[in-house]
Amino acid sequence: MVKYLNQDEAISIDLELFNEYKFSVDQLMELAGLSCANAIYKCYPNNRRVLICCGPGNNGGDGLVCARHLKHYGFEPFIYYPKRTEKQLYQNLTHQCETLDMIVSSHPIDCKSIDECYDLVVDALFGFSFQPPVRADFLPILEALKRTRKPICSIDIPSGWDVVNGKPEDGICPDMLVSLTAPKLCAKSFGGRYHYLGGRFVPFQLAEKYKLDLPLYSGTENCISLK
């Protein structure tokens, strides 16, 4: 049984990946975003029009990488990025998407627009370091995600959920969750159809130290179904 992490464990593992094992942020982001794109391709091969909602942190960076790979897989990603960051890494990721003729917009999107224009939504707004309350910039998109009829794929954490306690009473209900590195405790209350683990990069010693009991990935796969 794969281990489900609390917030402190997830933060500690990330710090060790950076400090002890010398991974860079952009390296982990690339691995995470690629595994998310591959999981989406497996579960939604025909849902080509994809709205990717990106936050200002690492979760949003994962979403930008995911968008780039989905574009190469023949999908039609549209990136909603309400609050960009000035950090060079995110500017580079955004530029890479724009040079593939993807639209990156901060213009507000409502539920009606999502239902009319897209087949799938990728939720890359907040990661496991999220602390409530939700900032005002992101309230409209979260409200839209609560009401949309389209399936939602959340990256690592469904945005707005408590990392340990899971879905709040009025939280979003994703159809798919792609956990990264190892699932977080909130994933135990996930009730959607698809739960994948992405990121076949965890050093063996680190997995043993935290007793992650990670599943065996098949062949060259970098994502694996947990449900």
Image (cartoon, rainbow, N blue to C red):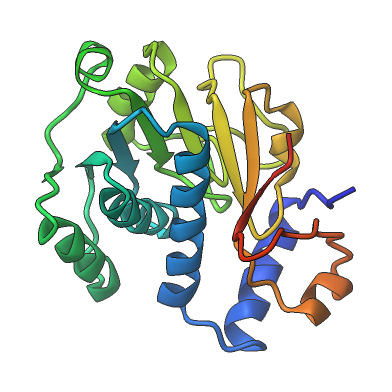
- Looking at the image, residue 217 sits to the left or right of residue 61; the answer is right
Image height check: is 30 above or below 8?
below
Q: Quadrant of residue 106?
A: top left
Residue drawn 20% across the image and 20% down it: 117
Across and down, in percent, residue 21 comes to 64, 87
Residue drawn 32% across the image and 23% down it: 119
Image height check: is 153 above or below 14?
above
Across and down, in percent, residue 139 comes to 34, 27
- Front residue of 207/39: it is 39
Q: How many marks?
A: 0
Image height check: is 208 above or below 108?
below
- Front residue of 154/162: it is 154
- Front residue of 56/48: it is 48
Residue drawn 57% across the image and 81% down it: 18
- Looking at the image, residue 182 sits to the left or right of residue 175; the answer is right
Q: Quadrant of residue 44?
A: top left
Q: Quadrant of residue 103?
A: top left
Across and down, in percent, residue 94 comes to 20, 60
Q: Quadrant of the C terminus?
A: top right
Across and down, in percent, residue 203 comes to 72, 78
Residue drawn 27% across the image and 13% down it: 115
- Looking at the image, residue 36 sits to the left or right of residue 21; the answer is left
- Front residue of 157/121: it is 121
